Amino acid sequence: MLQTRNLAALMQRYSIFLILGVFAGMIAANVDPHLYEELVEFHVFGDSAVLLGHAVTAHFLINGVFMVFFFGVAAKEITESILPGGALNPVNKAINPILGTLGGVLGPAGMYLLLAFAFYGGTSDFGTVANGWAIPTATDIALAWLVARLVFGQRHPAVNFLLLLAVADDGIGLGIIAVFYPDPELPVMPAWLLVTAAGMGVAFAMRRLGVSSWVPYIAVAGTLSWIGMIKASIEPALALVPIVPFLPSHLAATGVPSEHVPTETDGESVSEGIAGAHDSNSPLE
């Protein structure tokens, strides 16, 4: 049983399925673009299945539902890093990656426009190509996180630095898309973000009431945040980012990093030699 858990932890640690998915997607898109498009836009529950105005396609489920939890995990890592004893505490340590986000947005956009001018300047295609300047402003957090963990190690402060930069960078990128590339069928409606704010309020109330399970935070507050974002026509993948920081943790209560708190361990923590990497008593963990 332990060997199975260690194998699963090893595959998770090195994101084996992520790498396989990247290569499978690249091969499919280049060998048969039409088939790739059909797979991405496949209506999982039939053509008539619609959720809050969105067709339930494979693309929607992956981007709008599954990625919510990935960003939630990233938000958990960031939250721990800025709590007392974390790698980005005190707050002035978190300012650098946030300011670095500006470079992460302006730099790629500027380089894109420079290359577009170099290859298409003076042609009728320049305007069309240059219109894609916002594409490189976002960071592929999944791949960046994987590379950072391999280069620096699982618990290195640089990983949290990169995560905070990448999440902030993606948030700005999503804002740019909403403003400069609006969907005429789904216009941006900021008023719906009040529902997301309500979700944050619910999470805050749960914390004040001493709710000690992560489930209500994600199921209730997280769902409200998700509904608010998707109805506002803003990418709902970030729905848990404003909710996760409200989850209680031992780090916040004691100022002691979770690896120093006596806890149960699982296959991942055993395989990485991190005692107590997963704290069964902490909602944040």
Image: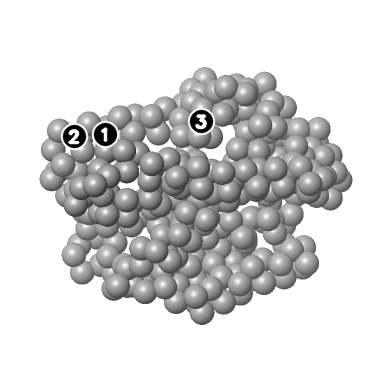
Q: CA distance from mark 1 to mark 3?
A: 18 Å
Where does residue 160 sit, x and y in percent of width and height? 65, 38
Where does residue 224 sit, x and y in percent of width and height? 53, 70
| SS for callout 2 | helix
Front one among 20 and 263: 20
Q: CA distance from mark 3 to mark 2?
A: 24 Å
**Earlier-in-chain disc, 3 versus 2:** 2
Q: In which quadrant of the rendered view does residue 261 lie? A: top right
| 102, above or below 278, in the image | below
Labels 2 & 1 near each other (Cβ < 8 A):
yes
Front one among 91 and 179: 179
At label 3, the amino acid type is Leu
Residue drawn at x 58%, y 56% as measured from the top left: 241
Residue drawn at x 75%, y 37% as measured from the top left: 87
Front one among 268 and 264: 268
Residue drawn at x 27%, y 54% as measured from the top left: 127
Toward the right, the furthest residue is 254
The residue where tag 3 is placed is: 146
Q: In which quadrant of the rendered view does residue 255 lie? A: top right
55 left or right, relative to 4? left
The residue where tag 1 is placed is: 26
| Residues packed near mark 1 inside 10 Å, few (<14), some (14 to 19) or many (20 plus) | few
Labels 1 & 3 near each other (Cβ < 8 A):
no
